[in-house]
Amino acid sequence: MESDKGKSSVEKYRLKQLVLELSKKRGRGTELISLYIPPGKPIHEVINALREEWGTASNIKSDTTRTHVQDALVKTMQRLKLYKKTPENGLVIFCGALPTNGLGSETIFLYEIVPIKPVQTYLYRCDDHFHTEILQEMLKEETLIGIISIDTSEAGLGLLYGDRVEVAEVLTSGISGKHRAGGQSARRFERLREMEVNDFFHRVGRHATKLFLEENRVSKLIVSGPGPTKDDFLKGEYLHYQLRDKIVAVIDTSYAGEEGIRETVMKAEKVLEDLRLVEEIKLVQNFLREVTKEDGLAVYGINAVESSLNQGNVDTIIVVEDINIITLRVKCKYCGREIIEYITRDEYIKRKQEILASACEGCQRLDYEVEEEDYIEYIARKADLVGARVEVISSKTESGIMLKNFGGIGAILRYRPRT
Ligand SMILES: [Zn+2]
């Protein structure tokens, strides 16, 4: 978590986009290299291992594949030599021959990623695709928090992602109320009840191990519930020791189970202050406040944000991660006339062809320079020039959906422009 704090939402967005893009790439043969280096592994050991792989690769029958693999290995080794030591979180490299313009046009590309969390195990793979799964997992579990909300009648197990909460399981104990049946001795009743509670706690512990350590890997755990039950549960060491180490808060709630999980998220805000979900809610609320004020400091929509940026009058931009727009810049090679359009991904190819097929309005000729850029990248670059901050907001949350009603993008201004 700590190493992650300095990362801006734009950097994370970039990393997500890159990983997504890499996951789709396919090699001509088994010739794309994936390399995961954990922090403890010395660079020279990795280079030696790759040198051996280079030798082994000489047995590959296909000339093209052999050349591609060996070239990729050489390029990777050259890059590694630039490192004096392995970075703090380790290093991930993807390298291989990728087509630039159809079959036979392959060029060796190298992508180097310093991960947001430490790489756990060394991995070298040569395959027809890049092994991005480990990085994708890292991005997913980066802010995953487990919640157990427990009393003697039920326990809810929940997963809190950076931007949403999911009730994964509700276990019921079947333990009857506090009153014993007639004729039963008080001691016998107590003993039976203790045994039942003990069994229930063990069951909750087992399910927690499965959900929080095996099926998912939570980085933190919060335990909640009404009364002292949760404390008894924790004292009894029913939880796996690895989970006990992850507990960041024990919170009193009025309910357990599903209700308890939701209550926990609300009450845990202090603990979760660094959690993106809370941050995003605040950003969007602030934006909405300014929008509804009579002379508030907010604008929204691509065009309004663009013109405020051009005036250098933007403090913060908030934009939904799936705005799915490409910025297309077309410039006439003769007269220099320039068109910039913001086009949704769905309409992109069609619209681009339309523009490129029509003669320049300035000089009637038809020869253009074309530049295209992901809209969020574009806006981040522009904002950087005027010192504005960009926050990429998840699209699945209530805040994100709210922002989508405003065209998916809004900005808080530095001052109220004169109208
Ligand atoms: Zn022209």
Image (spheres, grey):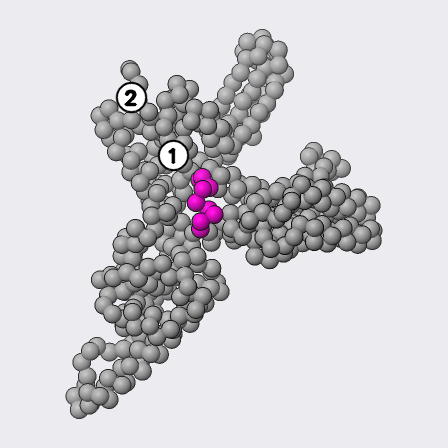
Quadrant of the drawing holding the C terminus: top left
289, above or below 361, in the image: below
Of the image marks 2 and 1, the number of the one nearer the N terminus: 1
Report if the beta carbon of the residue with label 1 is closer than 8 angstroms to ligand 1.
no
- Image point (33%, 59%), residue name: 249
Residue 2 appears left or right of 67: left
- Image point (37%, 61%), residue name: 247
Going by the numbered disc 1, the residue's amino acid type is Ile
Q: Residue furthest left?
A: 182
Quickly name the residue at label 1: 318
* Residue 144 sits inside the magenta stretch: no
Image coordinates of residue 325 in percent, x first then y, are 48, 32
Rendered image: mark on residue 175: none
Image coordinates of residue 208 in percent, x first then y, are 41, 67
- Image point (27%, 57%), residue name: 263
Image coordinates of residue 188 in percent, x first then y, are 24, 89
Quickly name the residue at label 2: 416
Secondary-structure class at tag 1 = strand
Going by the numbered disc 2, the residue's amino acid type is Arg
Question: What range is drawn magenta here?
Answer: 1-9
Query: Whole-Å distance between the Cαs marked 2 and 1?
Result: 18 Å
Residue 312 appears left or right of 88: left
